Every structure is written in C-alpha cells, then in structure tokens.
Image: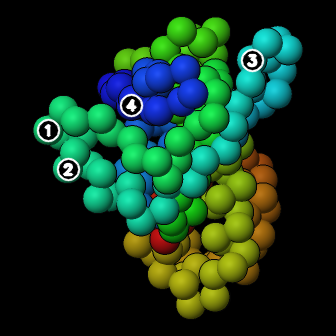
Amino acid sequence: MTESRWVWTTAGWCEYLACPALSCGEYNDYGLVGESNVRVFDRLLDDAPNGVNSESVYLGRFYVEDRAAYRTGEPYVSNYYDVPEPVDVLLVRGDYGHRARWVRADSPMAEHIPGDYPIIDDEDHSELVEETCAAAWEDSTLRDRVHYLRNTGLSHFASRLSWSDLFRRGARDGGEWSDDTGSLRDALVSR
C-alpha cells in the first residue's frame, strides 16, 4: 500500500510515494520487515546511477499533527521539512528512531518500492531476524532462556548454549529443533 505525500520545493509541490513497509522505528507496524527494507533500499540508493539524489529531513513531533490535514486532503507538508529542490529520495527521520524513505513518483528508485509482497530482499530479512534473535538470546538471563525454551516446547537444558550452538546441536541430533525454533524466534523478536 503506497500513499502519496506532497512536499513543497523551490519547484513547487512534488509528489513523493511513501510505503509503510519502507519505514521502521520503535512504533512501526512493520518491525524487522521495515528495518530490512530500509537497509536494502539504502544499499540500492548507494549503488544508484549518479543522477539519483537524496536529502535527509526530520519530521519530529509535527508529523502527528499534520496527519489530520492529510486525511482532509490538504497539503501534507509544512515548512519545517521543506526541501530546497526536488530530490529523488527523502531520507525521513523522526522521533523514537523513526526512519522512512519517500521516493519521488517519477524517480528511477520508485521501482524498488515494495508492492504486494512487502519484503524487498528475503535474504537480508532472514539475516536481520537471525542477528536480532542472536542478540536477544545473548542478552537474556538464564531464567529468561529457560522460560522461552519451555514455552516453545524445547528442552530447558539448552538454555546455556549460545544461539548458534543451539542450531548446530539441533542439526546434529537429527534436526528436531528446526521445526520448533520458529516459535522461539517469534518470542525473541517480539521481546
């Protein structure tokens, strides 16, 4: 689901496309999907042809106040994030770690906006999930680990293993852990 955002520039109003799956932050519904997409999109932007340009803007607390104006059809943008000249991509920052990428409708980067399938790069998303789970596992207390393992139907004796050892042992023992670890990943990611 892509939404239009109208931004005032020296050339007048420019339409930018904003996709919720191309944003991340503490209060974002897309979580690791959005974080992975922003990461991948930034790499694509770095590799883009020389003609593609970007500029960083800060939304801050006014972003919430302007949502009412957006719903009524008024221009969505105020002068606190005016852009001096039209650019291909706005690197939007906001409170609570909010990051988003708004892409100008006629930019070559518009083809990288997620469509019906919200993930730009499945491999990057999988890596991010594993990194997040490993960090959450390593930061967990022994008591928390036992709790996670018991709630997901796995043996609590594995609570002293590192995240990578947990899966190496499962593979060595016939892979019995591979089916149950999805719920363990979910518990750690939602932590």
Q: CA distance from mark 3 to mark 2?
A: 32 Å
Q: Position of residue 105 (x, y in %)?
A: 49, 14
The answer to whether any part of residue 33 appears in the image is: no
- Comes first in the chain, label 3 or label 2: 3
Which residue in the structure is indicated by mark 1? 72
**What amino acid is at disc 2?**
Ala
Q: Which mark is residue 52?
A: 3
- Comes first in the chain, label 3 or label 1: 3
Q: Which mark is residue 68?
A: 2
Above or below 8: residue 24: below
Q: Quadrant of the N terminus?
A: top left
Above or below 144: residue 24: above
Q: Residue at x 85, y 14 (%)?
A: 50
Q: Residue at x 59, y 37 (%)?
A: 83
Q: Residue at x 51, y 67 (%)?
A: 96
**What amino acid is at disc 3?**
Val
- Comes first in the chain, label 4 or label 2: 4
Above or below 77: residue 113: above
Given contact means CB atoms under 8 Å apart, are the residues at marks 4 and 2 in contact?
A: no
Q: CA distance from mark 4 to mark 3?
A: 19 Å
Which residue in the structure is indicated by mark 4? 5
